[in-house]
Each structure stands twice: as C-alpha cells, then as structure tokens.
Image (spheres, grey):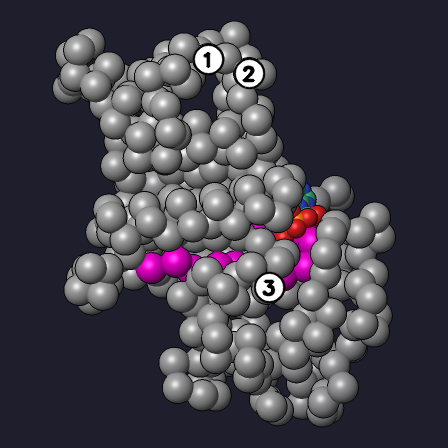
Amino acid sequence: MHDTSRTAGAVLEAEELSLFLRAGHGAELKIVDGVSFSIARGEFYALVGESGSGKTVIARSLMRLFPPNTLRMEGRLVLDGVDLTTAPANRVQQMRGRSVSMIFQEPMTSLNPLMTVERQIDEAIAVAGGLGRRERRERVVELLADVQFANPESVRSMYPHELSGGMRQRAMIAMALANNPSLLIADEPTTALDVTIQQEILQLLLRLRDQHGLSILFISHDLSLVRRFADRIGVLYGGVLMETGPAHGLIDHPTHPYSRALIGCIPRRREAGRRQAGIEGLVPGVADWFDGCRFAPRCPRVGEDCRHGRIEMTSTRPAQAARCLYPL
Ligand SMILES: Nc1ncnc2c1ncn2[C@@H]1O[C@H](COP(=O)(O)OP(=O)(O)OP(=O)(O)O)[C@@H](O)[C@H]1O
Ligand code: NI
C-alpha cells in the first residue's frame, strides 16, 4: 500500500539548510552546515550520527524551533509545499501538529502528569478545532486503538504515572497523530526502553506509516535498529550530512569513510566525553570547525585536497551519495 503513496512526492525537502548561532564575543557558530535531504510520503528516513552531530538541532529546525541564541537560518525547508524559512510565524504555528509532529525520548517531558490520557489527547485534537465534544471523544478512542492499546477504554482515564514506559510512548504517539500530520519526527524515542518494547514501538511506527502514509524522520544512534526499520539513512557528522542512501545499501556498503567508521563501531550509548571507541580522534567541537571535510583529521583516506574548500555531495552508488573526494 505504501508503495503507491510513496511516489506521491516529497513531504519534506531540506535544501542547503544552515543554522548560525551567536557565540560569545560577537562570534558566530554554524552548527548546521548545508544539509540537504528529502522525505517522501510514507517514507521512513533515519538520521544517524554521534552525539553532538546535530541530529536534534536539525529535527527541531524542521518545526522552526531554534536554540535561543540562533542568529539566522539559511537555505530552504519545504514542508507540505510551504517554505518554513519564509512562512509567517502564525502559519508555522498552525503547521505544528497538523503537518508535522514530534515525539521525544522521554515521554514524561511532553505528557502532563496531572492530566488523564484522554484529556491530553483531547486537547491535542481541540487545537485544530472543527470537532465537537462527542466526535473528539470518539477520536480519542480511535487514536488509542490506532497505537495498539489492547483496551483503549480503560487507558483513557489513566494518568501518565500509571502507564509503563512503552505505554507512555504510545500515548505520546497518539497525541502526536491527533491531527493527522504528514510527518512524524521521532528523536530517539526508544532509547530509554528495553529491547522488546523498542521493537514493538518501531513495528507500530511502520504500521502507522503503512496505514496512513505517514512519513517518519527517525533519529537514532542505533544503526542495527535503523538498518532493520528505515527505508533511507542520512549520516551526520559535525552538522554536515556526509552520506545518504537506502538503509541496507548504505550500511552494507558505506562509501564515506566516516560512515564506515561509524558502522564499524555502532555506539551503544551517549558517552560522557565525545570519544567513541573505534574512531580515532574526537568529533570537532562546533567552535573549532574549519574549511574542507570535517572528518579529514580522523580519516584514513584523507588527501591534501580534503582540507580545503567545499566538498560536494556526489553519487557513489545507485541512490547513494557521499560528500567525499575519495569515497570507498
Ligand atoms: N544553543 C546552543 N548554543 C551553542 N551550541 C549548541 C546549542 N545547541 C546545540 N549546540 C551544539 O550543536 C551541536 C549539535 O547538537 P545536537 O543536540 O543537535 O546533537 P545530537 O546529534 O542531537 O546529539 P545527541 O545524540 O547527544 O542527542 C552540539 O555540538 C551542541 O553542543
Ligand atoms: Ni539529540
């Protein structure tokens, strides 16, 4: 079913997206640098990268939620045909929840502990207006069934603390889907859950994608998870998209040396320092970024020309492209 809907064109197109922050002493930091990718209708796209690579900042930018010290955004960001870089604030506000919704690692940060599941989902539905009380009540039950609560009628009246971690995540997904968004952004939604529950949530997302033609932007450290569930992957490093391509192709045949290094040492958890076992050296801090390829100082294939100027994304394999002068 999703095969036909997937040809219906891009739900999201990010083109040369850059984000500049104000740093101390009048300096500016480019924390996202020329990132381009698109997500088709019904597509499950995963953004992967080490801690600090810019996954969350990019995800939030897609809802035009910028860090407070943001100076400006450059590039184009088109969601459901609307350019978010130029759309007025009220238009963007309207699109949140309706065109795009976001779920997070810790559902308790988005769920109100003092409100029942029903009330929270009801409020999310009411934001869009148009439905009467009774219709909204029906819609709540429908949403709870949609996220596969076996007994939606009883879950309705529960408070968040009465739910398990996996159930809270489902409740949050139900809220996020309240107004049928085209795109669901999931920022490491399963990292805090045990493996079985993690699989269940991923299966649920795939089912929702198939049933509703939902597009998913999934952010994760876990490449083994991503390989099993994503259609396509983007590999981020230091705010730069290094490689993008079909999930299986990219993981089985990475063409950027950084992707290969990342796949070779699938990181399991956030590390206190930014050193990752397996990749020599450190991720450059945003303040000490430089010209040329940001991976150059750690790259086994580096050439002198990698250290200067801009390196373009070039096709390396069918449907796969890398920002590298010496791809694998
Ligand atoms: N307001 C800010 N001011 C300065 N730097 C920031 C700000 N917000 C984020 N950064 C920096 O931008 C970079 C990207 O951060 P981001 O949170 O997007 O990383 P991430 O890939 O989501 O990491 P993690 O896997 O740990 O969640 C980091 O180096 C971070 O320190
Ligand atoms: Ni993050």
Q: Amino acid at mark 3?
A: Leu
Q: Quadrant of the N terminus?
A: bottom left
Q: Position of residue 312 (x, y in %)?
A: 50, 80
Q: Which residue is mark 2?
A: 162
Q: Is mark 2 within 8 Å of ligand 2?
A: no
Instruction: Say left or right for 273 vs 286.
Output: right
Closer to the observer: label 3 or label 1?
Answer: 1
Q: Quadrant of the C terminus?
A: bottom right
For badge 1, the amino acid type reads Met
Q: Which residues are magenta?
A: 43-56
- Dot 3 lies on which element? helix
Residue 106 in view in this figure: yes
Left-right relation of 229 to 41: right
Mark 1 residue CB less than 8 A from any atom of ligand 2: no
Residue annotated with mark 1: 158
Label 1 with label 2: CB-CB less than 8 Å? yes
Residue pictured at 80% horizontal, 63% vertical: 276
| Viewer-side residue, 294 vs 107 | 107
Q: Position of residue 180 (x, y in %)?
A: 25, 37
Dot placed on the residue nearer the N-terminal end, 3 or 1: 1
- Residue beneath the point at 62% across and 58% down: 222
Q: Which mark is residue 315?
A: none
Q: Residues within 10 Å of mark 2 (few under 14, many from 20)?
A: few
The part of the image, by quadrant, that contains residue 40 is bottom left
Per the rendering, the mark at residue 223 is 3
